[in-house]
Image (cartoon, grey):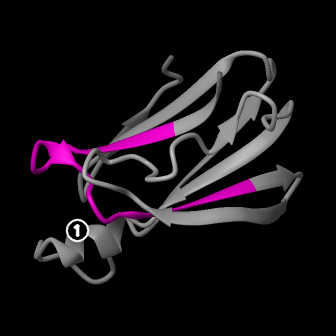
Amino acid sequence: MGLSTHVLDTMHGAPAVGMTVSLYTTQGEAATLVKSFVLNQDGRNPGGLLYDSTSLKTGTYRLVFDVAAYFKARGVALPEPNFLNRVSLDFGVAHADQHYHVPLLVSPWAYSTYRGS
């Protein structure tokens, strides 16, 4: 139970090692930074869960993935301005007693997400 994320680089067919991600709590348009971290070799938070089962609360959250910086660091030539700079996912947690996994599949030109388990 809790909140987790995972990023897969679909351009290279690998975890997005080294991508910076920020987690926020949100209230309307206001966002409060909870933590920022750099993804590990598996494309996950090196500290494990973003929230464990006792810390996750019902409410709204935002994950921001620094996509352009990640692909530039990988040596991908991106146009200026970039098509995707940062991907921001706003989502809600209705049942804090359940696990919320928020994966991101991303390339420099497209992304998709879903609620995983």
Quadrant (top left, top right, bottom left, bottom right) of the N terminus: top right
Q: Which residue does the image show at 46% across and 65% down from the upper left? A: 86
Magenta: main secondary structure equals strand
* Residue at mark 1: 71
Residue 39 falls in image quadrant: bottom left
Above or below — where is 66 with respect to 59? below
Residue type, label 1: Phe
Q: Which residue does the image show at 80% across and 23% down from the upper left? A: 96
Q: Residues within 10 Å of mark 1 (few under 14, many from 20)?
A: many
**Left or right: where does residue 90 sit relative to residue 104?**
right
**Magenta includes 16?**
yes
Q: Is residue 83 visible?
A: no
Q: Secondary structure at mark 1?
A: helix
Q: Position of residue 107 (x, y in %)?
A: 24, 52
Residue in front for this viewpoint, 80 or 106? 106
Region of the chain picked out in magenta, as a range? 5-24
Q: Which residue does the image show at 59% across and 52% down from the upper left? A: 63
Q: Position of residue 117 (x, y in %)?
A: 51, 16
Residue in front for this viewpoint, 6 or 27? 6
Q: Position of residue 103 (x, y in %)?
A: 43, 35
Above or below — where is 116 with respect to 59? above
> How many numbered dots are placed on residues in this image?
1
**Magenta includes 28?**
no
